[in-house]
Image (tube, rainbow, N blue to C red):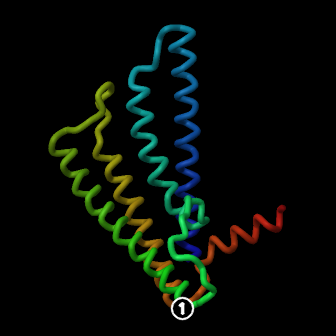
Amino acid sequence: MKALDHVSGGLAVVSGFVLVALIGLTFADVVLRYVFAAPILGSKDLLEMGMVTVVALAFPFTWRIGGHIVVDLIPDYGLAGLNRSRDVAVRAFGFAIFALLAWRAWLRADDAALFNEATNMIELPFQPFFWVLAAAAAFQALVLAAEIGLAATGRPLGFRAAWAAAETDTA
């Protein structure tokens, strides 16, 4: 799991750099648009494709640290077997979703290349962004598969617990 955590952390850092670049682009576009009446051509296209990259690359790290909104439909009754079954079922469902997303994004990348699909203003091709989405979804499926193995054997899921411990130490 440590290797997966390092990769997901690295992907999150790349995602953060892309997000900072998008913030800078948005700031520059607003200033140029309203001060000089000269917006950046294709800024909307770059923002849309950049956000695909940001979200796709940040998802595994966000999952590992438990950063998503969670609704407990099956509460914790203190029964280890039930909690383990719940954790395995949730991760298996997530694995199926992300494996399907990876597969469909990969197929969609081929279609995008075949039909020369691109953004409207600057004709940025869609294919590389579908590849990023497919690779990130496949990596998330790999993370979930590893967590299924941990949860099924009753071992701690790792990174989330370490992150929570680090937060309480600094508080």
Give the quadrant of residue 103: bottom left
Vertical arrangement, residue 48 with respect to residue 143, above or below = above
Give SS at disc 1: helix
What percent of the width, then of the height, locates residue 43?
Answer: 43, 27
Q: In this view, does 118 lie to the left or right of 24?
A: left
Q: Residue at x 42, y 72 (%)?
A: 142
Instruction: Give residue 64's quadrant in the image.
Output: bottom right
Classify 110 as above or below 79: above
Q: Is residue 103 above or below residue 125?
A: below
Count of residue discs:
1
The image quadrant of residue 101 is bottom left
Q: Name the residue under label 1.
A: 81
Instruction: Give the residue at x 57% y 17%.
Output: 31
Q: Is residue 98 left or right of residue 165?
A: left
The reply, left or right, for residue 98 in relation to residue 114 is right
Label 1 Cα crowd, 10 Å radius (few <14 / some 14-19 / many 20+): few
> Type of residue at label 1?
Gly
Residue 98 image point, x, y percent: 37, 65
Position of residue 167 relative to residue 127, above or below, is below
Q: Quadrant of the N terminus?
A: bottom right
Task: Residue 26: give x, y in percent of width and height.
Answer: 53, 28
Locate residue 50, reporting x and y percent. 44, 40
Farthest top residue in view = 36
Extreme residue in the left direction: 114
Please give the name of the residue rendered at 46% of the width and 73% of the height, measured from the top-left corner: 144
Give the residue at x 18% y 49%: 111
Quadrant of the image containing the C terminus: bottom right
